Image (tube, helix red, strand yellow):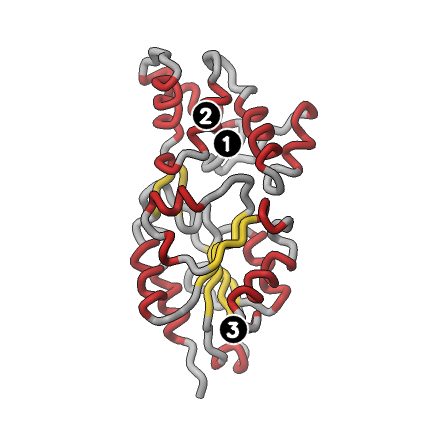
Amino acid sequence: MRPNEPHDTSPESSFRPITAVLWDFHGTLAQVEPLSRSVEIAADQLGVELPPYRATILADALGALGWVGSGQPAKVTPSFAAAWADRDLTESAHREAFIGLADQTSGAFDGFAEAMYERLIAPDGWVAFRDTIPTLRALRDAKIPTALISNIGFDLRPVIKHLGFDDLIDHWILSYEVGWCKPEPEIFREACLRLEVEPEDVLMVGDQPADAAATALGIRAYLVPHAGPGGDVGLDAVRQLVGAQRVE
């Protein structure tokens, strides 16, 4: 469901309590830093002097190719199509896929693609949304267990530790570690098993249709709107959804 849109209004779902919450990461709890900043840092690390206007041009060009956080579909070529298909299943495929994508950037400096990839996986290259930690803290205080479910090809734990909420995640279900990706039902089922809860008692919070696929197992879903780094995605509603569920 989107904000203010109940997913299921049947009497049974209205009174069955939510006892655990599953979280997507990118676009739900955090966003990558502004792309122009990533370009500037990549250039600086390579010793490339880059005027601000050129950083903006390169950022726009990379964003148009579908880089993370751009909201654009990725422009995949045959040279890295196989890696792109497996990007969330192995670390090597993830690296190859995103370096291949960035390597298409027009006017890029030497080493640009590799440097942009390193920035993508750098812990300080991510920004938590403003309402992320308060919401996770409220769930912890209410003794609601949580699990992170992410389609990802690298370890998010250092990123989330840097962002300051690793201690508020109880279980980590990363696609490249478990061998399943959203929207496959197995990845949601694995989360429920680790949390020791029934799917009907769980809320999945994400930002993509793949996250909402959890409903196929009976999990309720809430999708947040898009927001930029450090913005607010309306996670207060999650607290309301959990707090509003009561068994009569």
Q: Which residue is mark 2?
A: 116
- Tell whether label 2 touches label 1 (CB within 8 Å): yes
Q: Residue at x 54, y 49 (%)?
A: 174
Per the image, label 1 sits on a secondary structure element best described as loop
Image coordinates of residue 194 in percent, x first then y, are 54, 64
246 to 148, vertically: above or below: below
Residue type for callout 3? Asp
Per the image, label 2 sits on a secondary structure element best described as helix
Of marks 1 and 2, the one in the foreground:
2
194 to 34, vertically: above or below: below
Residue type for callout 1? Trp
Tell me the quarter of the image containing the C terminus: bottom left
**What is the distance, in whole Å, between disc 1 and disc 3 at their CAs?**
35 Å
* Residue 20 in the figure: left or right of residue 216: left
Q: Which residue is mark 3?
A: 201
Q: N-terminal of the two: label 1 or label 2?
A: 1
* Residue 184 in the figure: left or right of residue 227: right
Image coordinates of residue 137 in percent, x first then y, are 31, 61
Q: Which residue is mark 1?
A: 67
Q: Nearer the viewer, residue 242 or 193?
A: 193
166 to 17, vertically: above or below: above
Q: N-terminal of the two: label 3 or label 2?
A: 2
Image coordinates of residue 18 in percent, x first then y, are 46, 73
